[in-house]
Amino acid sequence: MTQKIKNICCIGAGYVGGPTMAVIAQKCPEINVTVVDINEKRIAAWNDENVENIPIYEPGLPEVVKEARGRNLFFSTEVDAAIEKAEMIFISVNTPTKTYGIGKGMAADLKWIELCARQIARVSVTDKIVVEKSTLPVRTAEALKSILENTGNGVKFQILSNPEFLAEGTAIEDLMAPDRVLIGGDIDTVEGKEAVQTLVDVYAHWVNRDNILTTNVWSSELSKLTANAFLAQRVSSINALSELCEKTGADVTEVARAIGMDSRIGSKFLKSSVGFGGSCFQKDILNLVYIAKSFGLDEVADYWEQVIIMNDHQKRRFAANIVQTLFNTVSGKKITLLGWAFKKDTNDTRESAAIAVADHLLYEQSNVVIYDPKVTSEQIYTDMVYVNSRSEEENRDLLTVAIDPYEACQNSHAIAILTEWDEFKTYDWQKIYDHMLKPAFVFDGRNILDVKKLEEIGFVVNSIGKN
């Protein structure tokens, strides 16, 4: 007989934990859902009276939070209390790539996962179902189980893997109508099957049971890494062809459309660009590379690592093209970057291509001005500190964040489109052209603008994958 869940706790109020728990609370009004985080500023933002001020920009999220918050959705810094009360605990903390020690630059850093496990073990006095929601390397559940069972108070824990398959910008749509929900557990034992079924019953409030897949834990963990690796591979594949298109006179957009109509391939993730970003693709592929290397599978590791190499090459190539086109020097020239988020409809900047491009241009002594409709100046300056040896004060002297796009473009030598925000398509480009230095260049790193119209105005336009 499966357990009836009355209280859920989620540790981690970030891009995964916040939206996922908000939707679960909305769809399961009989379950109290508490999202906890040690970051007081973040929790205060989630509790802001004006739901438009919640810390994550995601279309549709404010409406969901407004409906459930205070009814059965709560945000708190009281981590121990929430753990003690819950029958089911989701772990949704950050698992960044290690920057030190064995596996540096590839392996996932699991220190926050381990700290969560030890805290759960210390606090729990009743049996718990612990759900991995963070993206984790294969067999992490085994380590979790060891910590929980050997440092706890004698209570029983069931470990489930429930990876997220959300795309930022469409996360609420993805949660409301998922392609699939994947739940991995110890399906060879009665207790494990019951724990899996308990989580199935939560999602079955709104997800068709045919779309809820159950596997063993290891398959679930590896499926998440594999899904992101396949998607990133498609992006790097079309980006590799974009360079060939530029040399041969082909148009990468036309090539993508032609191969995308093949039902065996499909059209998704075939849009050439300055490169993919975000918290998942690069981190998960590097994790996959590290796992393959740890088993001595060097050819497998090399294959997947090439996806990252191609992505980094595309960013460098885009920045170098700006310098080359502007007569091989951008020293002292104003370059405007439109977009800082790694994709539209999110304020997430992790691994954004814009960061790498800006750093390259600053190295060339350009005056870089940035405008993004949802990313704060504080976040932009923080991002730059992590990619170079300059201090935040030095970056503030070299780089300017604008609050108005037209002001950002005034007296610029060139504009680079680095996020595919829809609003960029609606700008008065004639007005922008009139207030730029001539010749006026546009480097469309996302292939979202009408090139012919821009050229008719007088712009010199460079688009990825077009001659």
Image (cartoon, rainbow, N blue to C red):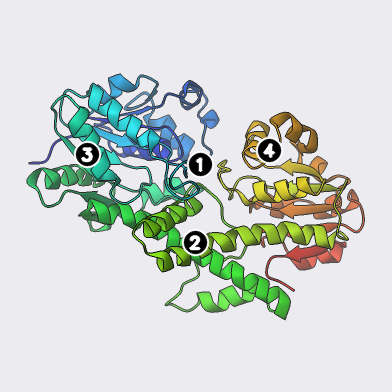
Residue picked out by circle 4: 389
- Measured Cα–Cα span from mark 4 to mark 3: 40 Å
Badge 2 vs badge 1, beta-carbon distance below 8 Å? no
Residue at point 41%, 66% (across, down): 300
| Residue at the limit of the structure toward the right, as seen here | 438
Q: Which residue is mark 3?
A: 145
Q: 38 left or right of 242?
A: left
Q: Position of residue 96 (x, y in %)?
A: 46, 42
Amino acid tagged 2? Glu
Q: Tell which circle, 4 or 1, labels the residue nearer the N-terminal end.
A: 1
Question: Which mark's residue is nearer the viewer, 3 or 1?
Answer: 1
Q: Which residue is rendered at x = 79% and y = 37% of the image?
A: 398
**Residue labelled with disc 1:** 99
Visible residue check, residue 205: no
Mark closest to the chain's N terminus, 2 or 4: 2
Q: Real-space Cα distance between discs 4 and 1?
A: 15 Å
* Relative to 452, 80 lies left or right: left
Binning the other alpha carbons within 10 Å of mark 2 as few (below 14), some (14 to 19) or many (20 upward) gives many
Mark 2 or 1, nearer chain start? 1
Residue at the image position 58 percent from the left and 60 percent from the top: 311
Please state which amino acid type lies under the numbered disc 1.
Thr
Q: Quadrant of residue 14?
A: top left
Residue linked to disc 2: 305
